[in-house]
Image: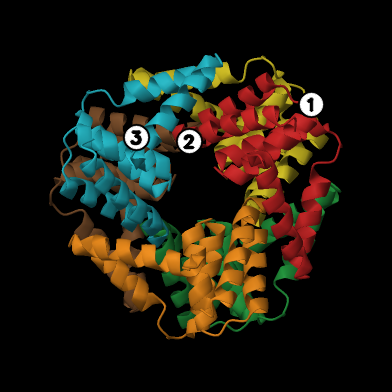
Chain colours: A yellow, B green, C brown, D orange, E cyan, F red
């Protein structure tokens, strides 16, 4: 039975492939940049992923939050670190962020259950 | 048969409980503040709920709109008052608000049917 | 079997009818204006629809994107023109637009399949 | 010596006149609608102005906040009512609203000093 | 006497130079992409500039609006075409766009006076 | 001669004092929370300040960016770390962030010159 994490990643991968196959140079380069920006530099990967997470949360983009929750987890972020990041997002972005916080928490649970 | 109002409230309550159980001080206090801010003061509860509704609508947060539709109704707001509030949101926030206006209207009907 | 394009349009039409039946003057006039603004003027209809599309995409309103994808297509916009429009949206609006880009692309495919 | 309230209103009036002189039908009608939407209806003028204020504050539009502060004051809103409205904006919109709250408070003082 | 158009462009150029001198790869590539995205393709330059203008206006970025007003003008856009583009922005983005519309109109006048 | 950093901080402090003197409970608690949220926890202060910086930048709040630039610097963030944080903001938030990036860079220079 496919879980929600796998479903999300499968849809994401399928549509990204289609978008990249279009050969639109601007879109292709933005996708490339996205990979580059989160590589280790002055800041380590975990910090960068948490930056991506808080930015996604204040801009209230559920799919972006899911993506950065997974990559934060993979880069070694603990649940407490993720919760502190999301609490800063909720304070800065306001209670309007709370519905996204609920869905973020639910997705984190799904990540833990699916060993992602 | 659970209706959409009950489903929304059940999910909301379940996830809020989980979030509060995390004992993140910032998140807990924001939840507390949310209760406080809508208590009677210089402005009565109904006016405050309509303020919450218009703010939720211009920021295009469907779940926040649903929440404030229900609490507006409970505080005695009439359908005409809610429609005027949503019309101000649509004018200030632009036609980008219209899809949320459609869903708000649908949820108001569900609130009326479920006697919430 | 109703496809996603028909479902989207049916829901949209049903709720718009209900909203207009409320006789809220502000909402009715905004709906009227929406029709007016996209009529031919100094700019032709296709250009205006692409303006509506890019604005919808940077503001990350999926339903607005769907609506303007369909009307862009009807006004003669090619897939390449639509992709360039969406690429500008993604550059200006940032990677936060990408999840909406995936759904836009999927809906464009559905439009092509359903001959809309 | 012209004060900040007069300067703001003079610039606003001058540019609105120029915009309306362009005879762009959509812009002219939106300006008209703006006047209509804040007339008494199911909700009284003061409530509507506070709705306009909270919406302007969460969307972080300083000029819109100034405009609705002045019209809220003219419609009889007290400082306490305005502060409660702005506190709801800050809670819903987050700490990102605080810089606008500072400027709103300063403008309210200027309104009081200039007897607007 | 330096006019507002020259001041804006001088500040913009000076700070862009400093940003690019930092050698941050992501920032440099985004600047590059920005140039690429507005080159002629399936859409001509004027249409792309108007797309950039409407996106800037609904996102309420004054500096971005100024930049695209100037490049729209350089690519041959007439005042009527610009006004229609801005009217669509105001309808989609709501009355919250109006303060930016006033400043856009003022800057367009400055562009005309300075022969930019 | 007062520099821009001192001017910004003086205005901020003066208006915050006035706001807190109003004794609006919700506003006072949000100010308190803001202090709490950036204290050391699972994440250290520097990381939290960079989270505040990236969130402020994608939400395009110049004053918030200034505040977090100063506190990032005080918590030991290097220019490279700040630039990487801002580059992630520009990628996620789009080119619409660039005008804020210019002003952020300028303010960072002022912080360095004023030894803040």
Q: Which residue does the image show at 15% across and 46% down from the upper left? A: C43
Q: Which residue does the image show at 31% across and 61% down from the upper left? A: D15
Q: Name the residue under label 3.
A: E6
Q: Which residue does the image show at 71% across and 50% down from the upper left? A: F10
Label 1 SS: loop
Label 2 SS: helix
Q: Mark 1 points at which residue?
A: F76
Q: How far apart are marks 1 and 3 (CA)?
A: 38 Å
| Percent coordinates x, y for residue D107 in the rendering | 57, 66
Q: Which of marks 2 and 1 is nearer the N terminus?
A: 1
| Percent coordinates x, y for residue E107 in the rendering | 31, 46
On what subunit does the disc labeled 2 rest?
F
Q: Mark 2 points at which residue?
A: F99
As drawn, is C111 to the left or to the right of F14? left
On what subunit does the disc labeled 1 rest?
F
Q: Residue C89 falls in which quadrant of the image?
A: top left
Q: How far apart are marks 2 and 1 (CA)?
A: 25 Å
Q: Residue A94 falls in which quadrant of the image?
A: bottom right
Q: Residue B115 carries which label?
A: none
Label 1 crowd (10 A; few <14 / some 14-19 / many >=20): few
Q: Distance between the residues labelled 3 and 2?
A: 16 Å
């Amino acid at each position: 039975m496919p879980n929600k994490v796998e479903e999300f990643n499968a849809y994401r991968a399928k549509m990204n492939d289609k978008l990249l196959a279009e050969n639109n140079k601007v879109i292709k380069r933005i996708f490339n940049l996205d990979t580059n920006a989160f590589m280790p530099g002055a800041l380590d990967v975990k910090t960068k992923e948490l930056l991506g997470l808080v930015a996604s949360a204040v801009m209230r983009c559920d799919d972006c939050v899911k993506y950065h929750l997974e990559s934060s987890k993979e880069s070694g972020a603990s649940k407490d670190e993720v919760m502190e990041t999301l609490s800063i997002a909720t304070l800065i972005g306001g209670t309007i962020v709370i519905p996204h916080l609920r869905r973020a928490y639910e997705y984190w649970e799904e990540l833990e259950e699916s060993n992602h």
